[in-house]
Image (cartoon, helix red, strand yellow):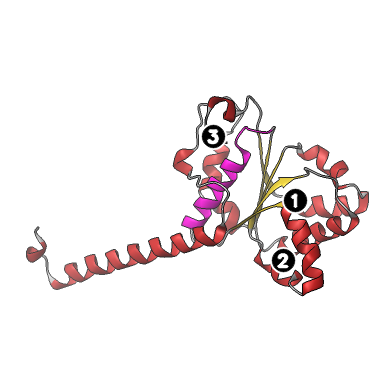
Amino acid sequence: ADIGQLGFEERLGLLLDSEAADRESRQNATRLKRAKLKQAATPEDVDFRHPRGLDRTLFARLMAGDWVAAHQNVLICGPTGVGKTFLACALANQACRQGHSVFYVRLPRLLPALALGRHDGSYAKTLAQLALVIDDWGLAPLTDESRRDLLEIVDDRHGCRSTLITSQLPVPHWHAAIGDPTLADAILDRLVHQAHCLNLDGESLRKKGKPA
């Protein structure tokens, strides 16, 4: 209403601010669309009241996004229904807001896609597309080919890109779940060191009708 009282520089500044905000909003919408997150979770939706052992201080630090800039990993472990995927998607949503590219994939679907990629020539492209979120780690036994694919993934990302993993298995059980001791050592050495761990417990949120 008072725009007429502003000088040219002030009006131009408001216009540029509006354009920048609109452009950032469009870019974030594009990043979220490409991310293909399983759940439309946002940081504002996270329920800290439910007793599941969620470290609120650590989660707040992760929301700041420094772990992505530092190429560190996040491992979210806990029984089914405690909200692992929801928290992972909230962190991924926040990463999109901060300008990072994200891609969500479930490990049981990723490994067959990589196996197929060897035959149709898309293997390298699939590996390059991966970014940030790998859900449902350790649900099924791994073949030798799958173990080697996992090593390729974590080695390609180690020190240059962050990875977020969710699993029903506690981290100490991952070595046995991978199967081959030598490959397990190599994979976990690249994943677990310099990783932030959220270890959840408690009753399923689905029983309470809440998003999990």
Whole-number angstrom distance, CA of label 2 to CA of label 3: 33 Å
Residue 121 percent location from the top left of the image: 77, 75
Q: Are marks 2 and 3 in contact (CB under 8 Å)?
A: no
What residue is drawn where x is 85% and y is 46%? 141
What residue is drawn where x is 63% and y is 56%? 132
Taking the magenta stretch, the answer to whether it contains residue 93 is yes
- Mark 3 neighbour class, 10 Å CA radius: few under 14, some 14 to 19, many 20 or more: few
Residue 10 to residue 189: above or below: below
Circle 2 or circle 3, nearest the eye: 2
- Mark 1 neighbour class, 10 Å CA radius: few under 14, some 14 to 19, many 20 or more: some
Horizontal side, residue 145 vs residue 191: left or right? right
- Image quarter where the N terminus lies is bottom left
User: Closest to the observer: 117 or 171?
Assistant: 117
Whole-number angstrom distance, CA of label 1 to CA of label 3: 30 Å
Horizontal side, residue 170 vs residue 206: left or right? right
Q: Are marks 1 and 3 in contact (CB under 8 Å)?
A: no
Residue kind at label 1, given as amino acid type: Pro
Taking the magenta stretch, the answer to whether it contains residue 51 is no
What residue is drawn where x is 70% and y is 67%? 126
Residue 108's tag is 1
- Image quarter where the C terminus lies is top right
- The magenta-colored residue range is 80-97
Horizontal side, residue 87 vs residue 149: left or right? left
Task: Name the residue beneath numbered marker 3.
Answer: 56
Task: Name the residue beneath numbered marker 2.
Answer: 127
Circle 1 or circle 3, nearest the eye: 1
